[in-house]
DNA sequence: TAATATATACCGACCGGTCGGTCGGTATAA
DNA sequence: TTATACCGACCGACCGGTCGGTATATATTA
């Protein structure tokens, strides 16, 4: 029998296992027994910490938030220009893609389930609102400082979010012609080009 | 008992029903019996036309392609500029969103399942490659005619695809501040701004 | 310090509802 | 008469969840 661990550690262990299994097989095809096996624990252990499969998934959304972009929120430093901050974000995306691309596969699952379940929708939206707000902050700063055109910050934030989500293409499909890093780099260039008041020749 | 229909009509009827149920409940939660009921037929009828649930879903991908953007491919007329053609695409997206927004919800399901199943991945990618190729055609035309910067056409095509996919935000979540039409319009503006050689003041 | 009691963490065999798929049959068309 | 289309009761594998139990940690008492 596994030695008793502090609640937080054990739950983190379970969530990590759930993340692996669910991103690989999808929520519905992921059996609780798969997660049990991946975690190296037992059904009892998991049901001791979570009420059920859905509860576990909801916890996974929060877990995703805290784990995936730990450096995201600290990137909005005062000394950097808005454009540079957005480039930093792009760099973070590339970094995460290289080390933990399952992060993006998880997102696909979030969206799919958000479409079917109100609680998942609510939690997912809360998560994305935070990211959108962060983007808006940067965009508004860029506008204020005369760096960017006077665009609608929320629309533009969703725009950038969507462009970043495009990385999913490279997580799910096989693209032999271009790679994710290239996509993100060129994309952020294009976006900044569209936002900039004076056009840079690349 | 339902009157025998021509194969194509009956299959289309089944696929329409499957589309409705699957976009609402997701593939796994959609029961064959749900589809049976929605179609107003019987299990026997559906299993007569399709080998099983997965086979039905694969057929749905093809069905999606032919049904959703009937006007997409005809939009690339020679007389219109590349920018205008992209604007036309955006207009199509808005039109589809208004009349059949489930189309975009279906895409989320495609991506989710493509991540888990090779056949679904293959078919989905084939579908998207066609769209990407179409976009590339327009982008290359824009470059050739001195309208656009000399960007990588494939990356840019995926970029635009991603921006359009952003409409899913409005299909799945509740955005009280902005709407899908606005998003698409401003987005295509931003994108064209980024691509354009001479900057238009909006 | 050891013995005892209580609470918490963990185990895994088992249950029972669900749902994809089957198949013997009937209706319709050729 | 034959072939095709359609019907729907039924089967059984599968899997989320349960629960009686054991192990470990913590508190209490002698």
Image: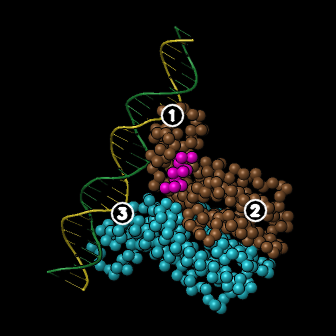
Chain colours: A brown, B cyan, C yellow, D green
Residues packed near mark 2 inside 10 Å, few (<14), some (14 to 19) or many (20 plus)? some
| Residue hosting label 2 | A87
Say if residue A27 shows up in the picture.
Answer: yes
Relative depth, front residue between B61 and B170: B61
Q: Would residue B188 appear left or right of B111 to someone viewing this image?
A: right
Instruction: Give the residue number, with chain letter if any, for mark 3.
Output: B33
Side of B196 relative to A49 (left or right): right
Image position of A154 (left or right of A31):
right
Q: Nearer the viewer, residue A20 or B192?
A: A20
Q: Position of residue B126 (x, y in %)?
A: 52, 73
Q: CA distance from mark 2 to mark 1?
A: 45 Å
Residue drawn at x 54%, y 43% as measured from the top left? A14
Badge 1 marks a residue whose secondary structure is loop
Nearer mark to the viewer, of 3 and 1: 1
Magenta highlight on residue B48: no
Q: Which residues are magenta?
A: A16-25
**What percent of the width, then of the height, locates residue A200?**
82, 73
Report x, y in % for residue A78.
83, 55
In this view, C17 is above or below B27? above
Q: Quadrant of the N terminus of chain B?
A: bottom left
């Amino acid at each position: 029998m596994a030695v008793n661990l502090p609640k937080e550690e054990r739950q983190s262990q379970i969530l990590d296992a759930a993340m692996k299994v669910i991103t690989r097989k999808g929520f519905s095809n992921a059996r609780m027994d798969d997660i049990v096996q991946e975690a190296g624990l037992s059904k009892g252990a998991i049901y001791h910490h979570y009420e059920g499969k859905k509860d576990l998934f909801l916890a996974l959304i929060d877990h995703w938030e805290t784990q995936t972009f730990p450096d995201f929120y600290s990137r909005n430093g005062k000394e950097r220009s808005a454009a540079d901050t957005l480039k930093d974000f792009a760099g973070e995306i590339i970094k995460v893609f290289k080390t933990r691309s399952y992060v993006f596969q998880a997102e696909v699952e979030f969206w799919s389930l958000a479409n079917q379940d109100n609680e998942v929708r609510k939690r997912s939206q809360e998560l994305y609102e935070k990211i959108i707000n962060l983007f808006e902050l940067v965009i508004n700063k860029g506008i204020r400082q005369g760096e960017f055109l006077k665009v609608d910050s929320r629309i533009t934030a969703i725009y950038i979010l969507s462009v970043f989500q495009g990385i999913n293409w490279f997580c799910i499909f096989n693209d032999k012609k271009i790679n994710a890093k290239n996509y993100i780099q060129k994309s952020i260039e294009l976006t900044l080009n569209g936002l900039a008041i004076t056009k840079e020749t690349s």
